[in-house]
Amino acid sequence: MSAKTIDDSIDAFMAHIGGKTASEHTLVNYATDLRQFADYLAGRSISEVDQVEPTVLRGYLRELYGWGYARATISRKLSSLRGFFGFLKERGLLDRNPARALRGPAAPRGLPRALSEEAVSRMFEMAAASESPVRDTAVMELLYGCGLRISELVGLRWSDVDLEERWLVVLGKGSKERRVPFGTCAQRALERLGARSGVSEPYVFEGRGGRPLTVRTVHRIVTSLAARCGLEGVTPHVLRHSCATHLVERGASLKFVQEFLGHESLSTTQIYLAVSASWMKESYAAAHPRARVADGE
């Protein structure tokens, strides 16, 4: 691709991700985010991709805040831009990714970081399209789908997995065992992994020499998948936090989340009430016509 116009570059990027495993929902979000950005650039007489400097992106970020978008929506839009400019850099159309260092909205101080459901879906899509799709999808299913700690994941043995009844026996902090249910998506991922590696092997995630996969390798898998989605700072623990946050947002009780995650104290789990409350306030502010009525009106 030699064209450097904004419109041609967006078309090329959309054709690229359309040929991957991206869902229709993901494609629509990318198209919406990038066309909105193109409109912003057109209003400033910017038509070439190499005209987009970090200062332009920071100005766009200020506009997004001014338009009243929720933090999660702004984060998604920035993720789309990072992915777009990352693609252009890989294709040699840009010397650098101007969106790489752009900071998105920070999470409230003291609260665990959680990805949006859309961002997690993108990571699953990248896992399915990776060089090791069976392994990487299973890693995602257990970190996000089951909320496992990274130490629990690498130590998991096939003898701890009941594929038929869909239960895991997990050895958590303080060598305490707990039972963790899993759904049909994780079941299929584990069945595929078992068919490939053989459940006769002791560890679910096998490394070299019959030893378990290392913590470092799991970190690399997660950060690599996140980077391909334009996400930065995503760790296995962020996926665990995201699992808990989404459970609470969808109505799960704190007692269930406590048992599910293996928290010793309910007070540890209660932080997700604050996360969920933050999400509710943002959703209300973004959607309700009376949420931002000026004082005195």
Image: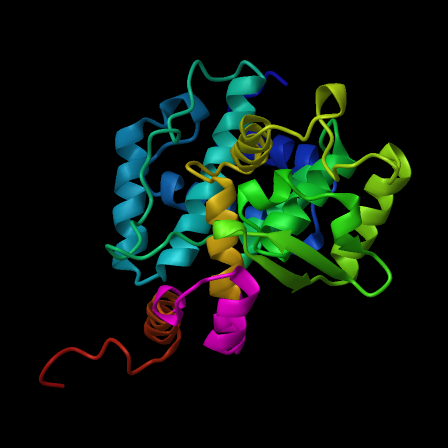
Image coordinates for residue 123, horizontal then vertical, percent: 61, 43
Image quadrant in which you'd find residue 98: top left
In the rendered view, does 147 fall on the left or right side of 277? right
In the rendered view, does 6 fall on the left or right side of 212? left
Q: Nearer the viewer, residue 116 or 220?
A: 220
In the rendered view, does 116 fall on the left or right side of 65? right
Image coordinates for residue 213, horizontal then vertical, percent: 66, 29
Residue at image point 62% right, 57% down: 146
Q: What is the quadrant of the C terminus in the image?
A: bottom left
Q: Nearer the viewer, residue 204 or 71?
A: 204
Residue at image point 68% right, 31% down: 212
Image coordinates for residue 185, horizontal then vertical, percent: 76, 57
- The colouring scheme, among rainbow, by chain, secondary structure or one colour, is rainbow
Residue at image point 74% right, 30% down: 206
Most common secondary structure along the magenta stretch: helix
* Furthest-left residue in this view: 296
Q: Is residue 185 covered in magenta?
A: no
* Segment tinted magenta in the rendering: 247-269
Image coordinates for residue 114, horizontal then vertical, percent: 44, 54
Q: Is residue 254 covered in magenta?
A: yes
